[in-house]
Image (tube, rainbow, N blue to C red):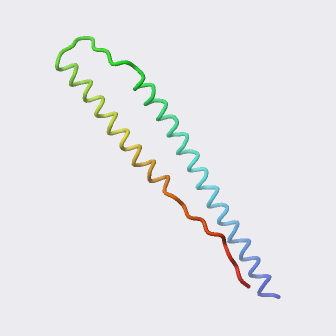
Amino acid sequence: MNSSFWYLIWLCVFRVKKLKETLVTVQQLDKTMSNLRSWLSRIEAELSRPITYSVCHEQEIQRRLAEQQEAQVEFRTHTFIWSAHTKPVRCTPHRCST
């Protein structure tokens, strides 16, 4: 009886710890999602603007090309960061035997 009681206490403590860890993970995910939404809004606004040239010469074209390349690098960086946050998590039911 005594060992079963302590086992239940331990199990409760363990579950509280896991719930706290889960809460921290969900809060981090919420912050990451918020940052992603902000970034996507900014990128969407940039991409929706038409490209206009004040003068059409090589220097202007090279400047615009460099801007596009920077945007592409930024997109790839965010894609890499986001994929690191969205790794699948395997959950298995906790089975206890007494």
Q: Is residue 47 above or below residue 2?
A: above
As drawn, the residue found furthest toward the right would be 1
Residue 81 horizontal/vertical position (percent): 42, 48
As drawn, the residue found furthest toward the left would be 58
Q: Which quadrant holds residue 23?
A: bottom right
> Residue at coordinates 40% horizontally, 26% vertically from top-left?
47
Work out whether residue 35 or residue 98 is closer to the camera in this orientation and state it. Answer: 98
Q: Which quadrant holds residue 57?
A: top left
As drawn, the residue found furthest toward the top would be 54
Q: Is residue 11 above or below residue 25?
A: below
Q: Is residue 93 left or right of residue 71?
A: right
Q: Is residue 17 left or right of residue 90?
A: right
Q: Is residue 92 above or below residue 97?
A: above
Residue 35 horizontal/vertical position (percent): 51, 40
> Residue at coordinates 44% horizontally, 53% vertically from top-left?
84
Residue 88 horizontal/vertical position (percent): 51, 58
Q: Is residue 1 above or below residue 76?
A: below
> Residue at coordinates 21% horizontally, 25% vertically from top-left?
62
Q: Is residue 39 left or right of residue 11?
A: left
Q: Quadrant of the N terminus?
A: bottom right
> Residue at coordinates 45% horizontally, 47% vertically from top-left?
82
Q: Count the marks.
A: 0
Residue 98 horizontal/vertical position (percent): 74, 85
